[in-house]
Image (spheres, rainbow, N blue to C red):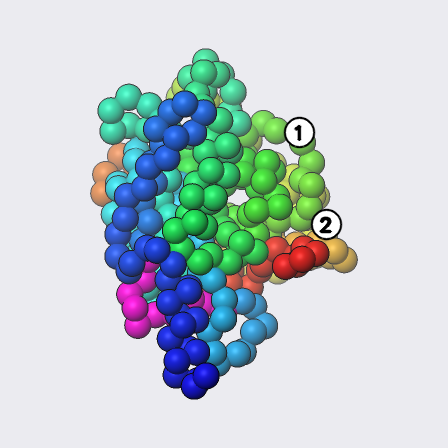
Amino acid sequence: MSGLLLSGLLLAAAAGGLEPGEHTRELQVEGETRSYLVHVPPESVSPALPPGDSRKQQRTGWPVVLVFHGGHGNARMMQRFCGMNETADRSGFVAVYPNGTGNGRGLSFHAGLGGLLFRNKPDDVVFVEALLADLSRSIHIDSRRVYATGMSNGGMMSYHLARSLPERIAAIAPVAGTMPPDDRPLKRPVPLMHFHGTEDRLVPWDGPNNRTARYLRFLPVDETVGRWRKDNLTVDQLVEQKLPDTDGDGRHVYRTEWAAGENGAPVILYRIDGGGHTWPGRAPRLRLLGDSTLDIPANELIWQFFSQHQLPERPGQ
């Protein structure tokens, strides 16, 4: 078989049943109709290779980045809000935007927050499991390279997934969303990159305050990072960088990294001084969300981080 023909067959297998472009998928989960959006890169883009793989011929499935919208949002809004599709096209991964549940267009995820608002909501962990099964029947994905990011409630959902499905999620990168009050230890270290503004009024750096709705309970940023560091077996020594103020707004971003210890995983925190409830690298659509920073491109940093990690190989893979 010629190399050209083999290459074509491999790319066809990687594409699976979903053509390049935008797709809306629906599925039944626990008696409810759930939906998600999928963005598949153009034909000229091959799936990104796994970390440490320098093969020239493409033999792998697509990495998958789950992108969860914030509370009172939806998948289509999240696509526009973060702009992850452009990064997917440049880097070679499939971007997936799940829809939460709720009334009308304002949806949210059951991210383990508890309280009356979430008590009767569907189990979104079960939804994500069903979503991944549905996606794998439609396109050739790399099951060792499924990642989660999200904004606000979607960031909290990323944390919740890493605790609930550590055998499916290779790494997470929440934005402006911290951990729910969950005392369960991680079943395995999960690499973490977290972005947060110090002036976030919706998910405050120091945790809920007197302006936070009583049904919302989440941990402060420092406690979130501290718990994740403990479970990730990071070293105590940190490396902190003050990044250049490239957009000239007088604000700075600080990057702090705790490297993985033996059998552990790294934790990276981007602290945006003066930053609001926003996505770094994107201008906020609503002034009430506060100020954003253009000093760092969250999407590129997230993918760069994700691309360094994959799940351990399981017997039979």
Question: Is residue 295 visible in the rendered structure shown here?
Answer: no
Question: Left or right: where does residue 165 sit relative to residue 272?
Answer: right
Residue type indicated by callout 2: Leu
Q: Is 280 within the magenta?
A: no
* Rendering quarter of residue 215: top left
User: Is 314 or 275 nearer to us in this picture?
Assistant: 314
Q: Main secondary structure of the magenta part?
A: loop
Q: Is residue 4 above or below residue 112?
A: below
Quarter of the N terminus within the rendering: bottom left
Question: Could you tell me which residue is drawn at 43 percent across and 29 percent down?
Answer: 29
User: Is 193 or 86 nearer to us in this picture?
Assistant: 86
Range covered by the magenta-colored residues: 40-49
Q: Which mark is residue 233?
A: 2
Question: Residue 255's spot in the image, x, y percent?
Answer: 52, 57
* Rendering quarter of residue 17: bottom left
Q: Secondary structure at mark 2?
A: loop
Residue type indicated by callout 1: Asp
Give the number of callouts: 2
Q: Is residue 258 above or below residue 148?
A: below
Question: Could you tell me which residue is drawn at 48 percent across and 16 percent down?
Answer: 119
Q: Which residue is mark 1?
A: 183
